[in-house]
Amino acid sequence: MPTANRSPAVRGRPPVDVKHRVKRLERPAGRPQCLSTGGRRERSAVLRDVAVGSSAKANAKADNGKYKEFVHHFRQASPYIVGHREKTFVVVIPGEVVARDDLLASALEDLTLLHGMGVQLVIVVGSQCQINSSLSSMGQEPQFVDGYRITDEAALRASVDAAGQARIKVEGFFSKAPPMPMVRRHEKYGGAFRHLPHLRVVGGNYVVAKRRGIVEGVDFQLTGEVRCILRDAIDSQLQLGNIVLLNNLGYGATGNVLNCNVYDVGLHAAVEMRADKVFCLHLDDVTDLGLQHWIPLSEAYHLIGGKPRRTINGIGSALDLNGSRDFASEGRGSLSVDLNRLSQNSLPRPVLMSVMACDQGVKRAHLVNAEVDGGLLLELYTRDGIGTMISTDFYQGIRPAVPADLRDIQELLEPLALEGTTVRRSAEELAGDLNNFKVFEQEGKVLGCALVKEVGLCAEGGRVIEVAAFCVHPSMRGQGKGDSMLEYIEQDARSRGVRRLVLLTTRTADWFLQRGFEGVGPAISSKLIPEARRSMISAARNSQLYIKEFQEWEGTTEATKRWVGY
């Protein structure tokens, strides 16, 4: 039979849908393909129709607003994902959150994702309300003195039971396998599938404690105070890819089990593990305070009535320390902080713990409302977060310029003007713009400066601020001082309702592009800056314009005080 007769078109078969036609035109297994010219043309046409149809569907899907938004947020989060990889986070989940299965599941979902993206997690789970409920069911009233539980034998049994139940809930959640369709789609090897725990959770006697003892005549019995955390043992588990789970139980040198405050455990874990961040989930007690989105440590001290006095074990006296001290580097047993004595102004413990963690070396502490679904992810992977962050003073040493700074500013800018990086400014011009300069000072010497000047309204009516003469002393480059200055400028601009930052440059574009600015072409012809400013631009320099638009804030302008970063 001639090969042409094998073509479905020649044989007069009824038309079928495209998928079936492609399948029938594919090469049969074990048989040589032999199509006539007409058959090959039909095959090519069918495949082309399928490709065009698939492309149209893909484009239609990509044009969907939901997908565009997802892509935008995913790209926006990518620097944070990279920045958090292999970092250590301590997360405190208090008993009132553990008691609500929906809130606990939401938090653990977020933590599962964080672990999958390479974050090393130490989770501290509390059980205070569960202990209270257990005692009440036994007909006993919980006893507290100055915020500390008096732990008798019955209370200790309730504490052990509650800690065990909380641990089992967390371990059970982390043992869930991923959805089977996903496993089948991505499994690399054939054969039977065997379910294994999705994540590995480890715990143990990592919390070393001592009895609180008798304080002002009150015997706290089996209530413990944390002496230290077994940092090396925990770190070895983190390096193996395990999640470390701590709770309110500590272990004494005599082999006894003690009931500790979960925030005390979380504070010691964060400080002694040298955690990059500490998170504390909370409910309305913190939300009702209406805290700012970002609180520098210097301002956070005011929340607790001033810089705290600390007791250093082995000396036994309270010492006023002028500067922040890294207790994690001083060895075991060196950190002793009585959170209760700091809570006389009725601040919730999560706030106290966060302030003290930053005071003792942790760079950033985050307060996240557990009732916000995905709150941990939103706090970490969106530019402005949804919680409150207390942090060491990233802006320390940055301030408005004063007349005494004029000479230092001139010395900073002169080398850049000589090489053509910046426009040469006379002493008179610098003096005239002095009120618009921000400087970075260290040990009485100005080591960075930036001219920040409002230049009018753009065509859309928004206020525009220009950043110019941006310079950091060569000895300070590579230490993040330029980033701190730029963030200071951005936050100040946001607080003033400015929507756009602009800068003109010929040599330093890459640095600003890496920090969110966008190039829009020659400055002299751009309508993104006011006409009055354009008329002052020198055509000979061919300066290029870079802009940074600020997103509109949802909520109050207090959000403008938020530090942006990892």
Image (cartoon, rainbow, N blue to C red):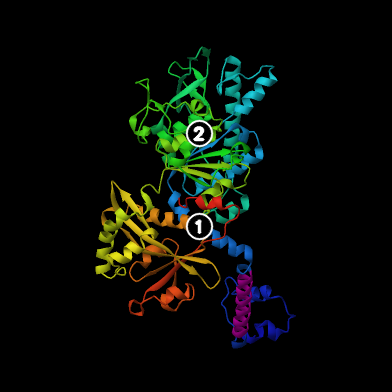
Whole-angstrom CA distance, mark 2 to mark 1, is: 29 Å
- Looking at the image, which residue sits at the far top? 217
294, 469: nearer the viewer: 469
Residue 411 visible in rendering: yes
Label 2 vs label 1, nearer the camera: 1
Which residue is rendered at x = 49% and y = 73% of the image?
A: 528
Residue 546: mark: none
Taking 298 as reference, is 430 above or below it? below
Residue 352: mark: 2
Q: Earlier in the sequence, mark 2 or mark 1?
A: 2
285, 459: nearer the viewer: 459
Residue that numbered label 1 is attached to: 494
Tell me the quarter of the picture where residue 164 sits: top right
Please give left or right for residue 251 compared with residue 557 in the image. left
Q: Please rate how many residues cluster around mark 1, counting C-alpha atoms within 10 Å: few if below 14, some from 14 to 19, many from 20.
A: many
Q: Amino acid at mark 1?
A: Arg
* Most frequent secondary structure within the magenta stretch: helix
Which residue is rendered at x = 41% and y = 57% of the image?
A: 486
Taking 56 as reference, is 336 above or below it? above
Across and down, in percent, residue 557 comes to 56, 53
Q: Amino acid at mark 2?
A: Leu
Residue 241 visible in rendering: no
